[in-house]
Amino acid sequence: MSDSNEPQVARALQDISNSVTNLVSEEIALAKAEVTDRVTNLGRGAGIGVAAGVFLFFALIMASHMLAWGIFSLTGGDHVWLGYLLATVFFVILAALSGLVAVKLLKKGAPPVPHMAIAEAKATQQAVADARKNA
């Protein structure tokens, strides 16, 4: 190699180094943005779900008394405990079904994986491998 080519080679190596650094930084930023967006949505959904649960809890208290006393009235007014028992069984079944749906939805949203960033990194890796083969 002659002395006149050394500055060009050094400059080319520096350009490659800068390009790789920029590429890695951009990939990290993409992954961070994607995960942040998904985590933010999960957090908002969880917060609103908790608020809905609190409101539903208070409504459930009123509904359970109404149901228990309604059953008490329908059975002739002899056994108030029967009304409360049937109302309790109904709400336990409802809670179990709700819990199953909640587990299904939570599994669907977690863990937050940066799919776009992973796909972009694989495409970059493939492009580098193809460039090496062609060189």
Image (cartoon, rainbow, N blue to C red):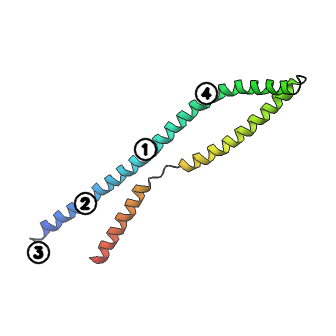
Residue 30, image x and y in percent? 36, 51
| Residue name at image x 67 percent, y 42 percent | 99
Q: Nearer the viewer, residue 60 or 132?
A: 60
Question: Amino acid under label 2?
Answer: Ser
Question: In the displayed structure, would residue 58 be above or below residue 132?
Answer: above
Does label 3 or label 2 sit earlier along the sequence? 3
**Cα separation between marks 3 and 2:** 23 Å
For the residues labelled 4 and 1, say whether their Cβ atoms are less than 8 Å apart. Answer: no
Using a 10 Å C-alpha cutoff, classify the residue at mark 3 as few (fewer than 14 neighbours), some (14 to 19) or many (20 or more): few
Q: Determine the residue located farthest toward the left in the rendered image.
A: 4
Does label 4 or label 3 sit earlier along the sequence? 3
Task: Check disc 1 and report the residue beneath it.
Answer: 37
Does label 4 or label 1 sit earlier along the sequence? 1
Task: Check disc 3 and report the residue beneath it.
Answer: 2
Badge nearest the viewer, 4 or 1: 4
Question: Amino acid under label 1?
Answer: Asp
**Cα separation between marks 3 and 1:** 53 Å
| Residue name at image x 54 percent, y 37 percent | 46
For the residues labelled 3 and 1, say whether their Cβ atoms are less than 8 Å apart. Answer: no
Task: Check disc 4 and report the residue beneath it.
Answer: 55
Badge nearest the viewer, 3 or 1: 1
Badge nearest the viewer, 4 or 3: 4
Question: Amino acid under label 4?
Answer: Phe
Quadrant location, the N terminus: bottom left
**Cα separation between marks 4 and 3:** 80 Å
Question: Amino acid under label 3?
Answer: Ser
Does label 4 or label 2 sit earlier along the sequence? 2
Task: Check disc 2 and report the residue beneath it.
Answer: 17
